[in-house]
Image (tube, rainbow, N blue to C red):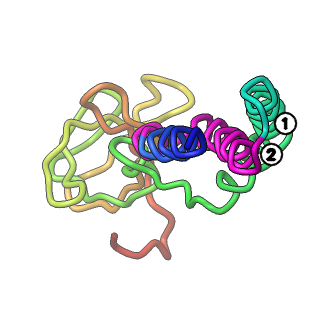
Amino acid sequence: MEWLFWIGGALLLVVVETVTADLTFLMIAGGALGGGLTAFLGGPLWAQVVVFACISTLLLFAVRPWAKRRLAATTPQMKTNVDALIGRSATTITAVDDGGGRVRLGGEEWSARLASAAPGAGLRLEAGTRVTVTEIDGAVAVVAPAPADASAS
C-alpha cells in the first residue's frame, strides 16, 4: 500500500504545478510515479527513494529545459499595455511639436510630443495630421508623421 502514498504525492505535485506552471513540480511528480511503480512491484523503501531521486533528477535536468523551450516557441508573444501602443497610428487634436501637443490614440486623448533627431528644429504638425506612435515616455506619446499610405488603426 506504500504505492498509494507515492501516487497521492504525485497528484498533489501535479496540482501544485497547475499553480506555478514552471514544469518543476511536474518533473518531481514523474519521479514520484517511478517511486510508486517500484513500491507496487514490491521494491524496498530505499529502492523506491533511489528510483524517485533518479527519475526526478533526470526529468529536471534533461526533459524540463527541452519542454520549456518547446512551450516558449509555441506560445504567442502578445504585446500588452504600453507595448501594444507602439507602432499604432493616431490623429493630432492640437498642433504637436517637440514641446508638446495632444493626440487621439485608440479612442483616448494623450499628451504627445514630436519625435525628432534635432530638438528645437521647428517641425510642427497641425491638428488633424495622422501620426505613428514611436514610443511612450511616461504618460506622453512620442509620435512621428505617418507615412502617406498608412491606414487607420
Q: Give the quadrant of residue 83.
A: top left
Mark 2, Cα crowd under 10 Å, few <14 / some 14-19 / many 20+, is some
Q: Position of residue 55 (x, y in %)?
A: 80, 38
Quadrant for the C terminus in the image: bottom left
Q: Is residue 64 above or below residue 150?
A: above
Which residue is found at the position 66% from the left and 55% from the top? Answer: 71
Disc 1 and disc 2 in contact, CB within 8 angstroms? yes
Q: Is residue 75 left or right of residue 88?
A: right
Q: Position of residue 40 (x, y in %)?
A: 69, 50
- Residue 131 located within the stretch drawn in magenta: no
Magenta stretch? 16-42
Mark 1 or 2, nearer chain start: 1
Label 2 sits on a secondary structure element that is helix
Residue closest to the eye, 14 or 122: 14
Which residue is found at the position 80% from the left and 45% from the top? Answer: 63
Q: Give the quadrant of residue 100.
A: top left
Quadrant for the N terminus in the image: top right
Q: Is residue 9 left or right of residue 124?
A: right
Q: Amino acid at mark 1?
A: Leu
Which residue is found at the position 80% from the left and 30% from the top? Answer: 57
Q: Is residue 55 above or below residue 145?
A: above
The Cα–Cα distance between marks 1 and 2, rounded to whole angstroms, is 7 Å
Q: Is residue 50 above or below residue 130?
A: above
Q: In the image, which disc is placed on residue 63?
A: 2
Q: Amino acid at mark 2?
A: Val
Q: Which residue is mark 1?
A: 58
In front: label 1 or label 2: 1
Q: Is residue 38 left or right of residue 14?
A: right
Label 1 sits on a secondary structure element that is helix
